[in-house]
Every structure is written in structure tokens, then in C-alpha cells.
Amino acid sequence: MGMTITTMSALAEPNRLHIVELLRDGPLTVGEITEQLGLAQPQVSKHLRVLSDCGFVEVHPSANRRIYTLQPQPLIEMDAWLDSFRRMWEERFDRLDDYLKLLQSKEEKQSSTEGAEDK
């Protein structure tokens, strides 16, 4: 699995998560991100560098601006990782459901035989 602790820790920081959420709607410049986050530009640049190192964002220089776009690969890897847990829990719930049905049918058989004895 390509996902690492670094990927998770990159999104664990609230401002970086907010940047990823902002970029979900489309590319933004550093200035636009800075404005929407209400942080100082050097702080935003530091967060963008971390996101870039983890592959979450890609930067495209355009004249004197730097435009950031969201990259899907780390999110796809994270989704696949989470899916492995989803499948595991679904299998466990299916087994529990089967077990509860078995118990229920045993109880029904037991109560029907007890009812027959009372007659």
C-alpha cells in the first residue's frame, strides 16, 4: 500500500486539511489560499510545501503567480486503505448477523418444543 504515516499526518494539521478542501473546488493561487485561510503567506507556503512533498498538490507557475491544484493519487491511496477496513468490518458484521440468526432459530425451535410439551 502506497499510503504512509506522512500522508495521514499531512492531513492531520487543520490548515492543511482546509487547503485540500479549498482546492477540491478548483485550482487557487497562494494569495487566494492565504486570503481564504486568514493566515500569513509564509505559513501558507510552508503548508503547501508539505502538501506538495506528500503529492497532494501540484504547483504550476503562471507569470508571477503560483497556481496550486489538488492531485488525486494520495486520496485514492487513502480511500483504498480505508476500503480494506470497510471490507473487514462488513465481513465481521455479516458473520455476527449469521450468528444472531442461528441463535434466533435455536430459540424459536426451543420455544416451539417447550410449547408442545405444555399441551
Image (cartoon, rainbow, N blue to C red):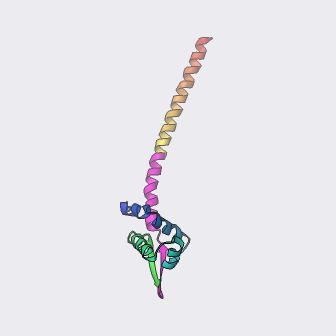
70 shown above or below 107: below
Q: Is residue 53 left or right of residue 111?
A: left
In terms of depth relative to the viewer, which is nearer, 119 or 24? 24
Q: Is residue 76 magenta?
A: yes
In terms of depth relative to the viewer, which is nearer, 107 or 78? 78
* Residue 28 drawn at (x, y percent): 52, 77
Examine the residues drawn in magenta and state their main secondary structure.
Answer: helix
User: Visible in this render: residue 109?
Assistant: yes
Q: How many marks?
A: 0
* Residue 53 drawn at (x, y percent): 38, 71
57 shown above or below 91: below
**Which residue is most to the right?**
119
* Residue 40 drawn at (x, y percent): 46, 75
Instruction: Identify the residue at horizontal 49%, vertical 34% (top origin).
Output: 99
User: Visible in this render: residue 4?
Assistant: no
Range of residues picked out in magenta:
62-89
Image-quadrant location for residue 6: bottom left
Instruction: Identify the residue at horizontal 52%, vertical 33% (top origin).
Output: 100
* Residue 37 drawn at (x, y percent): 51, 70
Q: Is residue 19 magenta?
A: no
**Which residue is most to the top?**
119
113 shown above or below 72: above
37 shown above or below 88: below
Q: Quadrant of the C terminus?
A: top right
Q: Quadrant of the N terminus?
A: bottom left
**Which residue is most to the bottom?**
63
Instruction: Identify the residue at horizontal 49%, vertical 46% (top origin).
Output: 90
